[in-house]
Image (spheres, grey):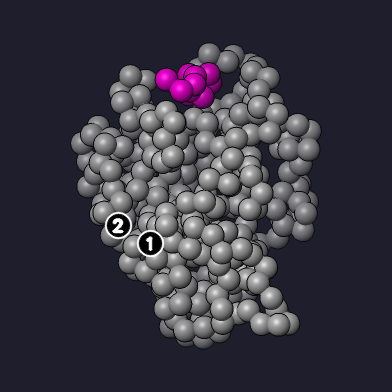
């Protein structure tokens, strides 16, 4: 086992948490969560028949918030419900059963069941266990990381992936149009039909000191875009106006994060969202983000259509696998 799992620590912790889970005061939720009037996170009707209006809404939200929720997106409620059910059932298995799917020590791949994801300054730890695996395209899938129990796990994940693809395609198309480039440009720039969908199931067990700990520390996503569904327990926060604000969930909405690769492609017009996860004293929080990212060897840089003498390139061209390595190891890009 790579490390003691947070699920086990939570069961044994009583009223305290180990010191390595206590965040510095500059990050503690009790001291840094904004308690005033919360600005409304953009909510966008994805079925809006007026494409120009939809492009404007998506573009504005991506520039001003880097984060929004979409409703009437066409993802069947049953597909989402089944995804959440089998994910929850996996984390209810015995420790021995879950460890069968553990991340391979020393592997460059993120896939597998694990606890520590990236290098953390001062040795701090996040109050989370997770399961990572690819769900699309078929050439990227390694089924050894897909739990065989519950038995319907594979079916639920395959159905969810199939339903998500047209939504991601439409989102990338709208983001392209919002930049003033042709509708296919962003999707092609992140791999076209080879765009990889990496599912992560975050499991945040009840924490006796949610005022001191974080489920995931502040970060932006490495992906092009991330589409996320949570369970009913609130916990996602975004940095807005230099304040950490709670992102209130809307039933059946999909939460969209602009990721680093779209920020790079847009040459900074769209920004990736800085966000974090808090935890709950009584309830288990879970979330299911799908990170839509370029293949490992794909080189990503600012779109040439957006680079001029007045607006020079703000980012380097880099293979996605090299970007990922630097990000996880806190190496400047």
Q: Is residue 99 left or right of residue 124?
A: left
- Cα separation, mark 2 vs mark 1, equals 7 Å
In the structure shown, which secondary structural element does the residue marked by tag 2 occupy?
loop
Looking at the picture, tell me which residue is in the foreground, 326 or 26.
Answer: 326
Q: Which residue is mark 1?
A: 195
Residue 284 relative to residue 315: left or right: left
Q: Residues within 10 Å of mark 1 (few under 14, many from 20)?
A: many
- Assess whether residue 286 is covered by the magenta stretch: no
Which residue is drawn at the image coordinates 73% and 43% (left, top)?
33
How far across and down, in percent of the image, does residue 226 sit? Answer: 49, 56
Name the residue rendered at 42%, 71% in the picture. 187
Q: Quadrant of the N terminus?
A: top left
Residue range highlighted in magenta = 1-10
Question: In the rendering, at what x and y percent does residue 44 appear?
Answer: 53, 70
Nearest to N terminus: mark 2 or mark 1: 2
Q: Which mark is residue 137?
A: 2
Secondary structure type for disc 1: loop
2 in magenta: yes
Residue 284 in sight: no
Mark 2 vs 1: CB contact within 8 A: yes
**In the image, residue 132 lies at what x, y percent?**
40, 41
């Amino acid at each position: 086992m790579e490390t003691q799992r947070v699920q086990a620590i939570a069961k044994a912790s009583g009223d305290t948490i180990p010191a390595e889970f206590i965040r510095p005061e500059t990050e503690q939720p009790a001291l840094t969560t904004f308690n005033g009037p919360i600005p409304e996170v953009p909510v966008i009707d994805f079925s809006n028949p007026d494409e120009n209006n939809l492009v404007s809404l998506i573009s504005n939200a991506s520039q001003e918030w880097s984060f929004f929720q979409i409703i009437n997106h066409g993802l069947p409620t049953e597909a989402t419900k089944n995804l959440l059910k089998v994910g929850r059932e996996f984390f209810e298995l015995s420790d021995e059963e879950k460890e069968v799917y553990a991340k391979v020590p020393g592997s460059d791949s993120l896939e597998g069941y694990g606890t520590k994801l990236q290098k953390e300054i001062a040795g701090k730890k996040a109050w989370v266990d997770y399961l990572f695996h690819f769900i699309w395209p078929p050439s990227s899938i390694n089924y050894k990381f897909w739990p065989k129990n519950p038995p319907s796990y594979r079916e639920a994940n395959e159905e969810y992936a199939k339903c998500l693809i047209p939504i991601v395609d439409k989102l990338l198309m709208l983001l392209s149009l919002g930049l003033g480039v042709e509708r296919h440009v962003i999707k092609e720039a992140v791999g076209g039909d080879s765009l990889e969908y990496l599912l992560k199931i975050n499991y945040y067990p009840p924490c006796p000191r949610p005022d001191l700990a974080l489920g995931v520390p502040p970060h932006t996503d490495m992906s092009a875009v991330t589409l996320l569904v949570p369970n009913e327990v609130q916990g996602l926060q975004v940095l807005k106006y230099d304040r950490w604000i709670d992102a209130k969930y809307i039933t059946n909405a999909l939460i969209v994060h602009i990721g680093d690769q779209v920020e790079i492609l847009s040459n900074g017009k769209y920004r990736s969202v800085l966000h974090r996860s808090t935890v709950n004293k009584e309830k288990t929080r879970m979330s299911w983000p799908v990170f839509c990212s370029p293949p490992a060897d794909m080189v990503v840089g600012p779109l040439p259509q957006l680079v001029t003498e007045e607006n020079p390139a703000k980012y380097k061209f880099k293979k996605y696998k090299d970007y990922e390595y630097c990000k996880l190891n806190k190496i400047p890009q």
